[in-house]
Image: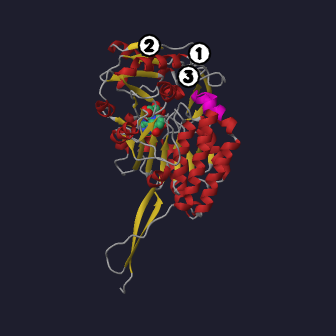
């Protein structure tokens, strides 16, 4: 049983409620977790508000804040094997992904933002009033609610915790109900690192816990990663006290394969781009626009590469693709596959559940997909690869931009002008040319249009977690 962490103390929910978290490879319960209710949300917000003004945090020198974040990175690395295995059990991702991506990505995020603590600066600006000194200060936004999804639980928690704390905010983190365990462990490690009580708080629970937190008048900012539909509800929930919002939402990343592309390299990259974490990635390449001259070759090679991947439990070292997160999610992915078949897409491989007690699904490739089909328009968030053909390169930016999403895009070509002309025309927060989607703490992550508001990572995260204040001083005699 795991608890809530409020004001520096662990404990159960006020009403004793709990929920179970499952191992998706075995479909068995791993443990029970405390389910925070409104009374716990009130207490966490009060603790975070008190910590905001506590000199132990508010007056802590920036260099000392940096050392705390650096210490978290060290502790994550010291506990790397344990965290990786826990992530694999709770989320299903292959252990190699947890070891080589999740855990190092988490540690690096804390180190990158440790570096920022001592570099958050204002400016002296040349206002036009005579005898006036004007400068800006960057100050913490306040109490930040950090609400995360289940697909990369530990890493996405770090994407929010590290910059929020680097900027001097206090936080309440609420992991997804499907995958709370690595966030619980991370918060234990953060407590060991020595943050003053109330600076970091943890509430576990589901949508109701998240909604209570999001609607709370004592919260100044929500940073949310999850579905576009919940993102929209948070816009409403934040209207009363006009909370600051960072929204990292859904996507439907187009991958464009030009006639001149190196098809074997494109297949290797796109299989990864589509199927990494079993396609449960917000930026997953999930609609493939291939020059008609290369479409058959690309499709058959993608199908062969997808078929060669071993689907199995994440803890098995031979596994390439782990399970989907839940039975419900598997049924939703399967419904997308059925709808593609109904719409007339041609199934090349997959299209069905794989054996096992857990929530395994075969990687699936469709040919003859058209822009109107739901499988080419809606986020599937699973191992499904719809291939569409194009005839005229000039039509492709318009087709890529034709959906409400704008998180990422990918372009495969050996022609520099094709690559950069398309990169400029596509309305998405990240464009990957001849490579798989990767996040990096040093640069922007976030979406255009219904893929979100604001940006995480890099200097953009500092903007997201600070308010800017202008200070005016009249220098003449009063
Ligand atoms: P979700 O929106 O269902 O849940 C995300 C989180 O919000 C969970 O912690 C959940 O408990 C909480 N929540 C649910 N309803 C809420 C409410 N009404 N108020 C407040 N909180 C609420 O998303 P999910 O299924 O966990 O994650 C998958 C989605 O996340 C996909 O759409 C994916 O594209 C998106 N995602 C986006 C990014 C990005 O960087 N843009 C990264 C990862 C995942």
Q: Comparing marks 2 and 1, which lies closer to the viewer? A: 2
- Circle 3 Cα neighbour tier, 10 Å, few/some/many (<14 / 14–19 / ≥20): many
Q: At 56% across and 52% down in the image, what residue appears? A: 113
Q: Is residue 115 above or below residue 451?
A: below
- Quick check: marks 2 and 3 in contact, CB under 8 Å? no
Q: Nearer the viewer, residue 236 or 346?
A: 346
Nearer-N-terminus badge (2/3): 3
**Residue 90: in sight, yes or no?**
yes
Q: Comparing marks 1 and 3, which lies closer to the viewer? A: 3
Q: Secondary structure at mark 2?
A: strand
Q: Is mark 3 within 8 Å of ligand 1?
A: no
Nearer-N-terminus badge (1/3): 3
Q: Secondary structure at mark 3?
A: loop
Magenta stretch bounds: 84-97
Apparent side of residue 136 relative to residue 343 in the rendered image (left or right)? right
Q: At 60% across and 50% down in the image, what residue appears? A: 111
Quadrant containing ligand 1:
top left
The percent coordinates of residue 106 (x first, y second) are 59, 42
Residue at label 2? 348
The percent coordinates of residue 338 (x first, y second) are 39, 14
Q: Which mark is residue 323?
A: 3
Q: Secondary structure at mark 1?
A: loop
Nearer-N-terminus badge (2/1): 2
Q: Nearer the viewer, residue 219 or 146?
A: 146
Q: Nearer the viewer, residue 42 or 465?
A: 465
Residue 93 highlighted magenta (yes or no):
yes
Residue at label 1? 357
Measure the C-alpha gap from mark 1 to mark 3.
10 Å
């Amino acid at each position: 049983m795991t608890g809530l962490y409020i004001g520096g103390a662990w404990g159960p929910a006020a009403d004793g409620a709990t929920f179970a978290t499952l191992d998706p490879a075995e479909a068995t319960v791993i443990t029970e977790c405390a389910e925070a209710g409104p009374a716990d949300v009130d207490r966490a917000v009060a603790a975070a508000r008190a910590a905001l003004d506590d000199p132990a945090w508010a007056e802590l020198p920036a260099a000392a804040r940096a050392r705390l974040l650096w210490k978290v990175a060290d502790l994550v690395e010291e506990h790397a094997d344990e965290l990786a295995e826990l992530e694999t059990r709770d989320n299903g991702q292959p252990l190699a992904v947890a070891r080589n991506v999740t855990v190092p990505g988490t540690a690096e995020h804390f180190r990158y933002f440790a570096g920022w603590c001592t570099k958050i600066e204002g400016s002296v600006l040349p206002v036009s009033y005579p005898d006036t000194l004007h400068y800006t200060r960057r100050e913490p936004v306040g109490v930040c609610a950090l609400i995360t999804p289940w697909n990369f639980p530990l890493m996405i928690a770090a994407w929010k915790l590290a910059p929020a704390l680097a900027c001097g905010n206090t936080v309440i983190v609420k992991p997804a109900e499907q995958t709370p365990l690595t966030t619980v462990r991370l918060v234990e490690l953060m407590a060991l690192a020595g943050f003053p009580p109330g600076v970091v708080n943890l509430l576990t629970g589901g949508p109701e816990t998240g909604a209570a937190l999001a609607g709370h008048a004592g919260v100044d900012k929500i940073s949310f990663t999850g579905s576009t539909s919940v993102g929209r509800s948070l816009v409403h929930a934040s209207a009363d006290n006009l909370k600051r919002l960072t929204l990292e939402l859904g996507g439907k990343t187009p991958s464009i394969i030009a006639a001149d592309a190196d098809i074997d390299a494109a297949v290797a990259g796109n299989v990864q781009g589509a199927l990494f974490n079993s396609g449960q990635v917000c930026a997953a390449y999930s609609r493939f626009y291939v020059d008609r001259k290369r479409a058959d070759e690309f499709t058959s090679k993608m199908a062969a590469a997808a078929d060669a991947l071993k689907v199995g439990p994440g803890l098995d070292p031979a596994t390439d693709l782990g399970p989907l997160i839940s039975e419900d999610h598997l049924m939703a992915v399967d419904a997308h596959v059925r709808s593609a078949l109904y719409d007339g897409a041609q199934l090349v491989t997959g299209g069905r559940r794989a054996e096992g007690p857990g929530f395994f699904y075969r990687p699936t490739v469709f040919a003859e997909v058209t822009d109107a089909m739901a499988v080419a328009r809606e986020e599937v968030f699973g191992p499904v690869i719809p291939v569409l053909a194009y005839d005229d390169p000039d039509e492709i930016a318009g087709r890529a931009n034709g959906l409400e999403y704008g998180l990422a895009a990918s372009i495969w070509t050996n022609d520099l002008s094709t690559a950069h002309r398309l990169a400029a025309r596509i309305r998405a927060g990240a464009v990957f040319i001849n490579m798989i989607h990767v996040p990096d703490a040093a640069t922007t992550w976030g979406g255009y249009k219904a893929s979100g508001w604001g940006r995480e990572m890099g200097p953009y995260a500092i903007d997201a977690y600070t308010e800017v204040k202008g200070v005016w001083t009249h220098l003449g005699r009063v």
